[in-house]
């Protein structure tokens, strides 16, 4: 296995002390940072994986910054579609309190779940049709054809858990609204598995059979301090990422990810005028990166790294890109 650890309302927008609408400003130095060298390959597993930090949002005095996402290019190979495979749901709270046995417990040399978990013969949902006029969008990375995005398998549900420790008032609602919106747009079936006590989003294992059973770990959304996640130090208020895996020469597929939200600074955002919409937009932007979208140069799109605060939902270009992200290939052998 290859491993690399790196990424609406009608009320008026908040203003800075100067009376200007605040902006998010890209950190050009961070965005221009070179991608790390490819890691050495460990032979014999046939499964490659990559951890990607895809978004850092900095909220400063009247503004903030988005640090660009990075992802390695992939190689696609077609795969057959398996029959649906269902598994037992998690107990209340989203954390398994029973010691798994057999395949669920894993073995010393098992670093991935049994293939085909919850795989269906066809996508479980369909993305919204892209707007006729389209707009600007980019993908974090594409398959070898240079066109198809590296994305989640639309034939499986995308489970997520939330660690609620430190959640501000209104934080849960912001997450729920953002997840519902991106699920509606992409057609990806997000399923909330409840709360978790998983300790950190840093250096997270993508396969945790003792906690989540014989499947890829669900997406983890957590409220964290800069002590729990040093990447949130200073004015940084969010960090997100996804992990792509491939079987042999098969296509790269995102299988899980993390979103870390600053438990200390989000209350300030939520208390601003129109703060609920701003907080939702921040989570939407991160989720856009989570499912495969990159930044654009068009300031009328939510995925633009600088905004005057008048774009609080996905715009035509974002919607066009997300429609493509939600139209990925079923890959049941992962």
Image: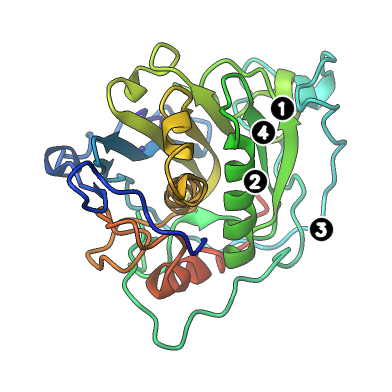
* Label annotation for residue 83: 3
Kindly state the secondary structure of the residue where label 2 is placed.
helix
Q: State yes or no: discs 4 and 2 in contact (Cβ < 8 Å).
A: no
Q: Gap in Å between the C-alphas at discs 3 and 2?
A: 30 Å
Q: State yes or no: discs 3 and 1 in contact (Cβ < 8 Å).
A: no
Q: Gap in Å between the C-alphas at discs 4 and 1?
A: 6 Å
For the question of whether residue 139 can be seen, the reply is yes
What residue is rendered at 40% in x and 11% in y? 227
Q: Gap in Å between the C-alphas at discs 2 and 1?
A: 13 Å
Q: State yes or no: discs 3 and 4 in contact (Cβ < 8 Å).
A: no
Circle nearer the viewer, 4 or 2? 2
Q: Say whether residue 241 is left or right of residue 23.
A: right
* Label annotation for residue 176: 2
* Quadrant containing the C terminus in the rendered view: top right
Q: Residues within 10 Å of mark 1 (few under 14, many from 20)?
A: some
Circle nearer the viewer, 3 or 1? 1
For the rendered model, the colour scheme is: rainbow
Q: Position of residue 23 (x, y in %)?
A: 25, 50
Q: Position of residue 164 (x, y in %)?
A: 63, 25
Q: Say whether residue 62 is left or right of residue 269.
A: left
Kindly state the secondary structure of the residue where label 4 is placed.
strand
* Label annotation for residue 161: 4
The residue to which callout 1 is attached is 195
Q: Gap in Å between the C-alphas at discs 3 and 1?
A: 30 Å
Q: Gap in Å between the C-alphas at discs 3 and 4?
A: 26 Å
**Can you say whether 134 is above or below 64 in the image?**
below
Kindly state the secondary structure of the residue where label 3 is placed.
loop
- Badge 3 or badge 1: first in the primary sequence: 3
| Viewer-proximal residue among 164 and 311 | 311
| Viewer-proximal residue among 316 and 211 | 316
**Can you say whether 52 is above or below 291 in the image?**
above
């Amino acid at each position: 296995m290859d491993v690399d650890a790196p990424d609406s309302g009608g009320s008026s927008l908040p203003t800075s002390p100067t009376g200007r609408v605040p902006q998010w400003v890209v950190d050009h130095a961070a965005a221009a940072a070179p991608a790390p060298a490819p890691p050495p390959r460990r032979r014999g597993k046939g499964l490659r994986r990559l951890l990607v930090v895809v978004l850092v949002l900095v909220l400063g005095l009247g503004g903030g910054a988005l640090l660009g996402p990075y992802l390695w290019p992939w190689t696609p190979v077609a795969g057959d579609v398996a029959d649906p495979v269902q598994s037992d749901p998690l107990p209340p709270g989203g954390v398994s309190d029973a010691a798994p046995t057999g395949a669920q417990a894993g073995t010393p040399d098992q670093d991935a779940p049994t293939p085909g978990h919850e795989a269906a013969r066809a996508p479980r949902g369909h993305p919204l049709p892209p707007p006729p006029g389209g707009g600007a969008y980019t993908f974090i990375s594409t398959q070898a054809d240079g066109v198809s995005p590296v994305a989640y398998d639309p034939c499986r549900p995308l489970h997520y858990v939330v660690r609620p420790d430190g959640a501000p008032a209104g934080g849960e609602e912001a997450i729920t609204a953002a997840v519902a919106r991106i699920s509606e747009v992409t057609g990806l079936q997000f399923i909330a598995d409840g709360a978790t006590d998983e300790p950190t989003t840093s250096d997270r294992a993508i396969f945790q059979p003792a906690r989540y059973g014989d499947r890829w770990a669900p997406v983890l959304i957590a409220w964290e301090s800069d002590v729990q996640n040093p990447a949130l130090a200073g004015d940084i208020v969010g960090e997100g990422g996804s992990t792509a895996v491939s079987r042999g020469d098969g296509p790269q597929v995102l299988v899980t990810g993390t979103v870390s939200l600053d438990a200390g600074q989000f209350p300030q955002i939520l208390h601003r005028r129109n703060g609920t919409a701003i907080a939702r937009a921040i989570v939407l932007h991160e989720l856009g990166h989570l499912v495969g979208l990159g930044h654009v140069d068009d300031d009328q799109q939510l995925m633009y790294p600088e905004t005057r605060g008048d774009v609080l939902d996905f715009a035509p270009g974002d919607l066009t890109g997300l429609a493509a992200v939600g139209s990925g290939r079923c890959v049941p052998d992962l």
